[in-house]
Amino acid sequence: MKTVRLTTTDLPEYWAGSDGAYYGPIRRVEARCQWCGRWAHQVGLFYRHEPLTGRGALVCGRHVRRPRPH
């Protein structure tokens, strides 16, 4: 299973991923993760955006590790 580490950016609740993409949380949405196919209604859902290609994907919280708040 792929896991991405997130680091903070200047925008709140918007993180840079170790894979070069950017991630933002999506609330109140139930959808399938495009990496593992599981429904993401209990572990959270993130929108993954690749700035150079313009592609996006929905990724569940099983695949992201957010930085701890200070």
Image (tube, helix red, strand yellow):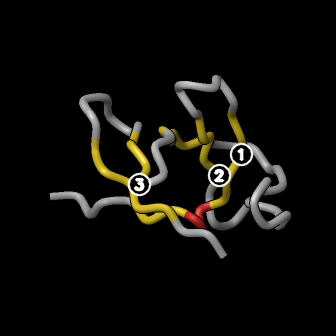
User: Which quarter of the rendering shows the N terminus?
Assistant: bottom right
Mark 3 in CB contact with mark 2 (< 8 angstroms): no
Neighbor class of circle 3 (other Cα within 10 Å; few <14, some 14-19, many 20+) is few
Give the spatial CA distance, label 3 vs label 1.
17 Å
Q: Looking at this view, is 47 or 40 the one in front?
A: 47
Q: Nearer the viewer, mark 3 or mark 2?
A: 3
Q: Position of residue 53 (x, y in %)?
A: 63, 26
The residue at 65%/52% (across/down) is: 45
* Residue 18: assigned label: 3
The amino acid type, in three-letter code, at marker 1 is: Leu
Asked which quadrant contains residue 61, the reply is: bottom right
Q: CA distance from mark 1 to mark 2?
A: 7 Å
Pointer 2: what residue? 45
Tell us which disc is closer to us: 3 or 1: 3
Placement of the C terminus among the 4 image quadrants: bottom left
Q: Residues within 10 Å of mark 2 (few under 14, many from 20)?
A: many
> Marks 2 and 1: in contact by CB < 8 Å?
yes
Spatial distance from mark 3 to mark 2, Cα to Cα? 18 Å
Which labelled disc corresponds to residue 58?
Answer: 1
- The mark that comes first in sequence, 3 or 2, is 3
**Residue flagged by tag 2: what amino acid is it?**
Leu
- Amino acid carrying label 3: it is Ser
Q: Is residue 11 above or below residue 21?
A: above
4 w.r.t. 30: above or below? below
Q: Position of residue 66 (x, y in %)?
A: 39, 60
Residue lying at 26% horizontally and 63% vertically, measured from the top left: 68
Which residue appears farthest toward the front when viewing the image? 52
